[in-house]
Amino acid sequence: MYFAPVDATADQFAVKVLEESLPPVLSEGEKSCSVFRAGEPWQGVEEVNGVTLDINIGVRLVRYGAVRLVGEANEIRLHYNVGNTRVYREAGTKFVVIADEEVDVVEALISQYPQYSLIKDLPDIGGKSGKTLAFVTKLFEIGLLLTDAPVLAMRDVE
């Protein structure tokens, strides 16, 4: 008797759901705690609205069902629906390839949802908190994370 590979089938189904679903809708309060707060981060070739995170900031996923970790083609992909359009399947599958050691950070963020986790309390990548901060910043810039307090664009601080 032959059985279908359940994990692979579930992953395929979840990726299809992410591809076809609408992106998370953020409230005004959530927008102020996201990368979308500052608008367009670039003006020509100059960064104007960049946000700097530090290890004492709390972060969480934008929505519980907005991401899915999937092992595909000898790599680990973090699929997400942030940035999907209202047109059915217009943009295709969105994912970012992550390293094996970054999986623990993503799993911690998923398991902690909806609570915020301080970046310094997330698992260290390669034993270095600087790598964790860089990875969390990457996820934040994609739009997958919210901070526990409104973010300030660099121009607001200067």
Image (tube, rainbow, N blue to C red):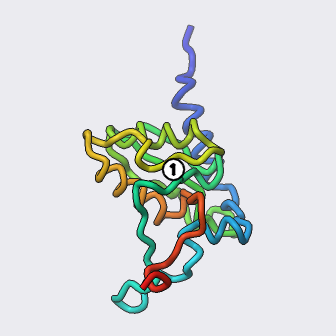
In-front residue for pair 11/39: 39
Above or below, 104 relative to 24: above
Q: Residue at x 56, y 40 (%)?
A: 110
Image position of 31 (left or right of 27): left
The relative height of residue 78 versus residue 101 in the rendered view (above or below) is below
Q: Residues within 10 Å of mark 1 (few under 14, many from 20)?
A: many
Q: Position of residue 83 (x, y in %)?
A: 58, 66
Name the residue at the bottom extreme: 44
Q: Is residue 76 above or below residue 155?
A: above
- For the C terminus, the quadrant is bottom left
Secondary structure under the numbered disc 1 in the rendered image: strand
Residue projecting furthest to the top: 1
Q: Position of residue 113 (x, y in %)?
A: 62, 43
Above or below residue 107? Residue 46 is below
Q: For residue 92, which quarter of the picture?
A: bottom right
Badge 1 amino acid: His
Quadrant for residue 36, please give it: bottom right
- Horizontal and vertical percent for residue 73? 36, 40
Residue ID for mark 1: 79
Residue 22 figure quarter: bottom right
Residue beneath the point at 44% across and 50% down: 119
Q: Residue at x 45, y 85 (%)?
A: 155
Numbered marks: total: 1
Which quarter shows the N terminus?
Answer: top right
Q: Residue at x 53, y 46 (%)?
A: 117
Residue 9 image offset from top left, x and y in percent: 57, 31
